[in-house]
Structure formats: C-alpha cells, structure tokens
Image: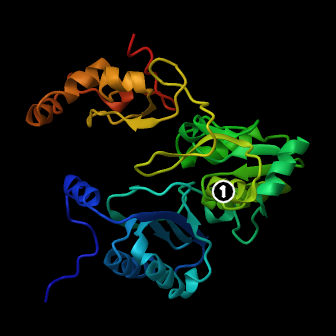
Amino acid sequence: MNKEILYNKKSRDQLKQELDAETFDRVTCSFYRYMDIEEPIHFRDALYREWNRLKILGRVYVAQEGINAQISCPDFNWNQFLSSIENHSQLKDVPIKRAVKDGKSFYKLTIKVKKEIVAYGLSSDEYDMKTVGNHLSAELFNEKIEQGKAITVDMRNYYESEVGRFENALTPDVDTSRDLLPAVKEMLSGHEDDEIMLYCTGGVRCEKASAYLIKQGFNKVSQLSGGVIQYAHDIKTKGIESKFLGKNFVFDDRMGEPITNDVIGVCHQCERPADSHIDCGNDACHILFIQCDRCFKLYDGCCSNECKDFASLPIEEQKKLRKDPDRVVSRSRYSSRVKPKLKEATQ
C-alpha cells in the first residue's frame, strides 16, 4: 500500500510553470480563528487532503491555539472551499476576507503545525484570549482618528508600515513578531488609561496583541475589525474616506495591495519615492527591500552591484562560489537588525 503524501514534492520552478499555465482565475483570501485544537496534526492533515484536491494554494499555520490562513482558490472551486470550511465545526461561520486584488499570490500549498499562529513568543500567563480588545468598524475607526484622542498603533513590522499606514499611527521599528510586543509596550508606557486602537493586515496579530496589552494593564484597547483588508473593502463599498495611506503589504508573491494612490515609501537605493518591495535577485542574498523602476533596471532587480554581478554568473559557478564566504553577498552585509542600508552600497 502506497504511503499517503500530504506535502508538496515538486520544485519551485515546476510549480511556477504550472501556475503560469493555468487558464482560470483565482480568489485570494484569508481567515483566522483563535480556538482550541486538541490534535493540530490531525486537523492539519485533514485540511491538506481537502484543499489539495481543490487545487488550493497558500500558506496556513495550525496550532493548539487556532488557525491562520492565507490562500488562493480556483474560482470554480470557491463554493466547494466554503463548504469544506463549514464542514469543520470549529471553523463554522469564520469570517473570510477576500483580497483587495486577486492574482497569482501563491504557487504551492503549505500547511504547517506551529507552536503559535502568531509568533509573539508569549507564555500562557501573559495573555487571555477570552479578553480581547473591542472590534471597531471602519467608520468608527475613522471617527476616532478624526477626534484625535485615541493612540493608533500599527501592529506590523517596519517594512509593512513604510509603504502604507494610518494617519499619525505609531509604527514600531521592528522586523519580527517576537520583537513587536515589547516595543509597543515601551512606546505606550504611561498611556495605560488612554484609548488605544490597534490595526494589522487582517486582524490576527491585533487579536492576540490586544489580549496581551489588556493583561499588561492597558484599560482601553480596541482593534480594527478585519484589519486593513476589511477596511479596504469597506471604504470601497461604503464610500468612506480612507485614513489609510499607501499600500497594504501582503505576505505572498504580490507583495502589496494598493489602498490609495499615495506613495509614502522611498527606494532604499536612491531614496526616490517608491513603494514596491522586491527580494534581491541574487538568491544568495535575497534581502527584502524597496526598489524603484529606475534602480530595478540599473541593478537588474538586485540590491547592489556585487549582487548584480553574482546573479549574472552561470548557476553552477554560483553554487561553487557560494561556498566561499568572501565571494557571496549575504543578507547581513547591507542589512542592519531593522532596516537595509542599501544607499551606501550603491554609491
């Protein structure tokens, strides 16, 4: 009897070729739910069987505390996907947020069992998911921003807020979830009795962060319901003014969804206005940075001349040279703990 394979075995190139050859449209969406999952591995395997059969692609984290999913579903399988969700009692009526812009966002299906669905690194006594911040609609969130009394906090990493954020929001200079809560707690020190409004991409980070802040003694914590994704839908369908400026960074191949036409970021190489993230074209580096169209052409999608030269070498020669630390441009060369320092690399 053949052993059941519940993971992808194809190469990235093969998967991308198959994706490019598709003749149908896809729906990109996300959802999360904090809940008790007694057997995460069993739950994970069941989802993989169902969704792989439906040609669903995406990235899904399952843990004992719940599920966090970003997926891409063929449009002709959308109703079957919704049925598969409803067939799991734990996921019944879970809010599903469709992306602002559909596209080829993922090229494979990955479902991983994790310790946490948001990697804050918290112990169980530091938060209580039964006590979370109030959910605010887009209208109420805007109203409170206009009143100017609440403190708006971006619960995302720096590279997300540098291309899009709410007016006057606090934006922590961190690049990992583990560093985020300590930074936010320090920024809010002394404001325990002030009204605090959190927002993130889809809501999953704020849900847990609000529980943490409440446990730490902050008394008036609320969160944007459905995150920036739902906010973007609401301003379109309801004709609401957008207090969010720029792009909503997303963790898939699209890298971002425009919410407004404002370009608030700058190219990390020339400092001209830009808001398109890219991974360095040198796979030995692969640093994430913002690059304008001019610099993309100048550096062939790389972060520096060294990476451009290295990426132009034959693949076999690259493989040999990657074993030589003096010849490989690594992530650490032009990246600080928080932000890449690429301007000095291109001067």
Q: Left or right of 149: which side holds 76?
A: left
Q: Nearer the viewer, residue 183 or 57?
A: 57
Vertical placement of residue 301 versus 87, above or below: above
* Percent coordinates x, y for residue 243 in the rendering: 75, 43
* Percent coordinates x, y for residue 142 in the rendering: 81, 49
Q: Quadrant of residue 316?
A: top left
Q: Nearer the viewer, residue 324 or 344?
A: 344
Residue at 48% across, 24% down = 268
* Percent coordinates x, y for residue 19 in the rendering: 28, 59
Q: Left or right of 139: which side holds 22?
A: left
Give the color scheme: rainbow, by chain, secondary structure or one colour. rainbow
Residue at 58% across, 70% down = 96
Position of the N terminus by quadrant? bottom left
Q: Quadrant of residue 283?
A: top left
The answer to whether residue 163 shows anywhere in this view is yes
Q: Secondary structure at mark 1?
A: helix
Q: Identify the residue under disc 1.
A: 227
Residue at 46% across, 65% down = 27
Q: Nearer the viewer, residue 216 or 13?
A: 13
